[in-house]
Image (tube, rainbow, N blue to C red):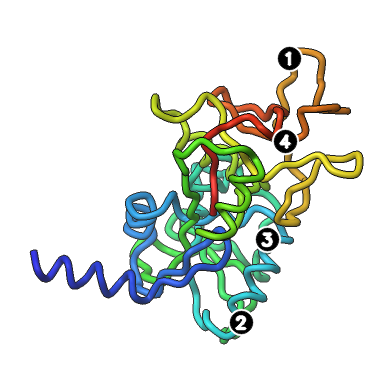
Amino acid sequence: MKTVILKMLFIVSVAQRFGKHVYVQHAYTWPDAQQYCRLHHTDLSPITTRWEEERLKNATVEKVKNFFFIGLYIDGTQWKWSGGGDATNIAWDPGQPDDIENQIFGCICWHGCTWNGWHNTRKSSQWPFFCFDLIIVEAEKSWEEAMWYCRQEHTALMSLASETEHLLALSRIKRDHITERVWIGLRYLEDHWLWVNHDPLVYQAWSQRGNQDHQCPIYKRCGALTKEGVWENWDCQDRLNFICY
């Protein structure tokens, strides 16, 4: 038992947060890394947009100097993300992916490598890895109170930049004690919806029912994710649980 506790303390001590992602320096195989992330965070990290890739690359330039795993794997002939959703626009290095039958997981090397991009690798490979980490806060607050809480206690209200991030958030809020919808970092300002952490709004999941009030809201100018898996606009003074990262 003491050995297990010491090992876990060591792993925690070599973890660093970069926005939505936590870099774990301890080397695991991809399946073990997935299990670790699901136990201690949310899942292995999806890097689903070039914008997110560049931001993470720039943030880690002095800290990540080797290959690392992300939540990319192949299912049959389709590359997918561990948290759900197909993987597209992958920045493979020339000649990659190769040996698909045996090299079925995705890894990246940006710094300190001969190649600068994405690779596939075999099941037995061991690398450090990135976990995706979202935090459900069960206190009920207004949207603005939630925004400030996330900034003070964590990083920011959660943005859902892709289908995979949306699915990961949805999987965490489907509990009886969570409010039927939760605040996310979506706000209607200057005649358009935006993420308050400045992520680009490239993925959307608005409800297709009702009068589409979100297209030009008068009072309901804050965005929430429902347990049914859609975005809705609500009065910013409503008090809901919320998601930080």
**Viewer-side residue, 84 vs 102:** 84
208 over 183 or under it: above or below: above
The span from disc 1 to disc 3 (Cα, nearest Å) is 31 Å
For label 4, the residue is 222
Q: Amino acid at mark 4?
A: Cys
Closer to the chain start, of discs 2 and 4, is 2
Q: Amino acid at mark 3?
A: Glu
For label 2, the residue is 61
**Viewer-side residue, 103 vs 126:** 126
| Res 176 visible | yes
Circle 4: is it few (<14), some (14-19), or many (20+) Cα within 10 Å? many
The span from disc 2 to disc 4 (Cα, nearest Å) is 35 Å
Answer left or right for 102 relative to 200.
left
The x, y position of residue 25, in whole percent, is 40, 75
| Res 162 visible | no
Kindly indicate whether the residue at mark 1 contacts the one at mark 2 (C-beta within 8 angstroms).
no
Tell me the quarter of the picture where residue 12 sits.
bottom left
The span from disc 2 to disc 3 (Cα, nearest Å) is 14 Å
